[in-house]
Amino acid sequence: MRRLLWIAACLAAVACKKDKPAALEEVKSAGDAGAAVSREEAAARAVKALTGQCEGKNLESCRALGVLYADGTGVTADPARARELFTRACDGGVVKACNNLGLLYASGIGVEPDPPRAADLYRKACDAGDPLGCRNLGLMLQGGRGVPADPARAATLFDKACSAGASFACNNLGTAHRDGLGVPASPEKARELFLKACEGGDPTGCRNLGALYIEGKGVKQGFSAAAVWLERACKGNDPAGCRQLGVMLLEGKAGPVDEKRARAVLTQACQSNDRPACEAMVAKGWAVRNAPGKPVPEKTP
């Protein structure tokens, strides 16, 4: 649950690191410099500082405090409190907070799911210049969730957000070009966009780029090249990227079979709830099933 909440809060900015409250970053830097400040203490200090600033009507601090309540960083996770803080900041003109709030309504975290309300909030953020508000509205339009489906409009919004630096949106636009959703199908354009997303810090873009090399779409087929991009995806904690890399290592498609490395990356994917990776481990005898039937990786020898 906490992981889901952090993902929701984190998507409110172009990158998770950029979305962290400044107070938390400043205390963390002090700890890195040698001060005796634990991560927990740093988070608690950030909550205290942001609470005071929010009470002083600093609405950006209210939004940042909402991120911490959503994730449970430095404070007990409280999605309802996060919603209250995001609402206050959004109503006061902090556009990122409108996107944060939209994510809560879209996912039903701390509130009843309300896709039309989420789409309205994303639109408000997008119209005010927030790239991820545009990106998230594009996702709603692409899937027809909360709004009538409009893949062409979705692609336009992905393009706008990608151009503004939202790497997630570059990946979404790449997918649209790969599959011909609202734009002409173009694996070459998809390759360009997946690369931009990957270089911008979105591991899903790295994984999708690797998949193009596996399939030979828009690029010359090459398993060694695919492994490079899948490795980057896996290092960025993309479970599907780890799984695809693990399968390649087991099959020896990018060089000699490497079961030790394959087991490591499949374990990483399985522990991130990628079920196909867990099943692959069960097949190799590297995982066992617990009582509910979910594969559980055994300890690596």
Image (tube, rainbow, N blue to C red):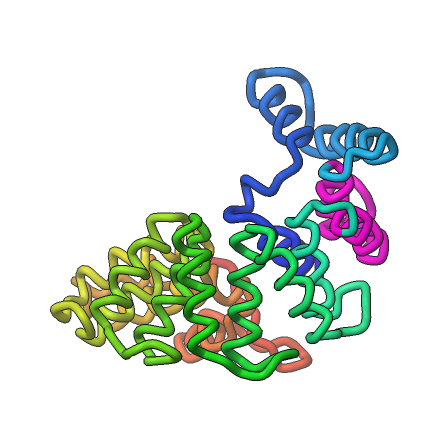
- What is the count of numbered marks? 0
Viewer-side residue, 46 vs 55: 55
Please say whether residue 112 is visible from this viewpoint.
yes
**Going by the image, does 93 lie left or right of 174?**
right
Does 48 sit above or below residue 270?
above
Q: Is residue 65 magenta?
A: yes
Q: Which residues are magenta?
A: 61-90
* Residue furthest left in the image: 220
Residue 242 percent location from the top left of the image? 39, 62
* Residue furthest front in the image: 127
Residue 155 percent location from the top left of the image? 42, 70
**Residue at 71% in and 41% down:** 64
Q: Is residue 155 magenta?
A: no
Does 24 sit above or below residue 244?
above
Residue 156 percent location from the top left of the image? 42, 67
Q: Quadrant of residue 203?
A: bottom left
Residue 213 percent location from the top left of the image? 21, 68
Does 66 sit above or below residue 21?
below
Quarter of the image with the N terminus is bottom right
Dominant secondary structure, magenta: helix
Viewer-side residue, 76 vs 264: 76
Quarter of the image with the C terminus is bottom left
Q: Quadrant of residue 107?
A: bottom right
**Residue at 59% in and 16% down:** 34
Please say whether residue 213 is visible from this viewpoint.
no
Viewer-side residue, 32 vs 147: 147
* Residue furthest right in the image: 55
**Residue at 27% in and 78% down:** 185
Q: Quadrant of residue 133?
A: bottom right
**Going by the image, does 295 lie left or right of 200?**
right
